[in-house]
Image (cartoon, rainbow, N blue to C red):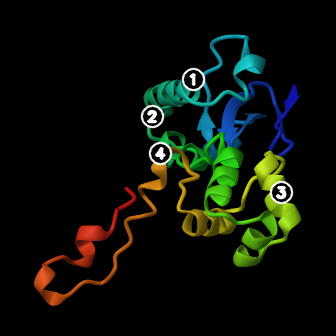
Amino acid sequence: MVQCEMCGAETSTPKTAKIEGAELQVCADCVDFGTEVDTGSDSSTSTKYSTGGSSSSSSGSASQSSGSTAGGSSSGGRSRRDMFDDMDEVVADYDERIRSAREAAGLSQAELGDQLNEKASFIRKLERGESLPSDDLRKKLERALDIELLEGGGSDEGTEWSGGDAESGMTLGDVVKRKD
């Protein structure tokens, strides 16, 4: 008997599920909290922390297989996607982009820190790649230095509704994106 890594219950047939970005061995009750992962191969250690195509193909096959075996007994929890699959990621060369944009603007690390209300030592850590910027700081850096720090250019965040006038014919329904 194996213990569920989520609730601690003893189970004879553990299932591998991706829950909030981590692959866990869970019981049948807890597998609904994430996405069931296909464990067809024994190379789970090499794919455990991989990103990109391998996780999307395994989650796609898991949702297809769970749809055929679930028989409608669950509330569709197996077919939902993991929240970390949709999150934007900071570009790999964020440190170089911050440093080059700061230098191009003619600012020292202390001056940029004062402008952003951050310590110069934290700006130094960002430029060395020792620390990732928080979402708030990332937005401040993007505005102050006119750079993009998200992969894909951050096009989703730039489409905010600015109001408009009555003659434009644009409504809130034209701008809002539904999450189905």
Task: Write the residue at 73% across / 26% down.
Answer: 48
Does the rendering let one see residue 114?
yes
How far across and down, in percent of the image, does residue 147 sit?
54, 57
Marks 2/3 in contact by CB < 8 Å: the verdict is no
Task: Write the residue at 34% across / 63% down.
Answer: 177
The amino acid type found where label 4 is placed reads: Gly
How far across and down, in percent of the image, does residue 152 sit?
47, 45
**Number of the label disc, if any, that sits on residue 124:** 3
Q: Earlier in the sequence, mark 2 or mark 1?
A: 1
The amino acid type found where label 1 is placed reads: Ser
Report the residue marked by disc 2. 71
Report the residue marked by disc 1. 54
Camera-side mark, 2 or 3: 3
**Number of the label disc, if any, that sits on residue 152:** 4
Does the rendering let one see residue 20?
no
How far across and down, in percent of the image, does residue 88 sit?
56, 50
User: 10 Å neighbourhood of mark 4: few (<14), some, or many (≥20)?
Assistant: few
Task: Write the residue at 34% across / 80% down.
Answer: 162
The amino acid type found where label 3 is placed reads: Arg
* C-alpha separation, residue under disc 3 versus residue under disc 1: 35 Å
Total marks shown come to 4
How far across and down, in percent of the image, does residue 89 sit?
60, 47
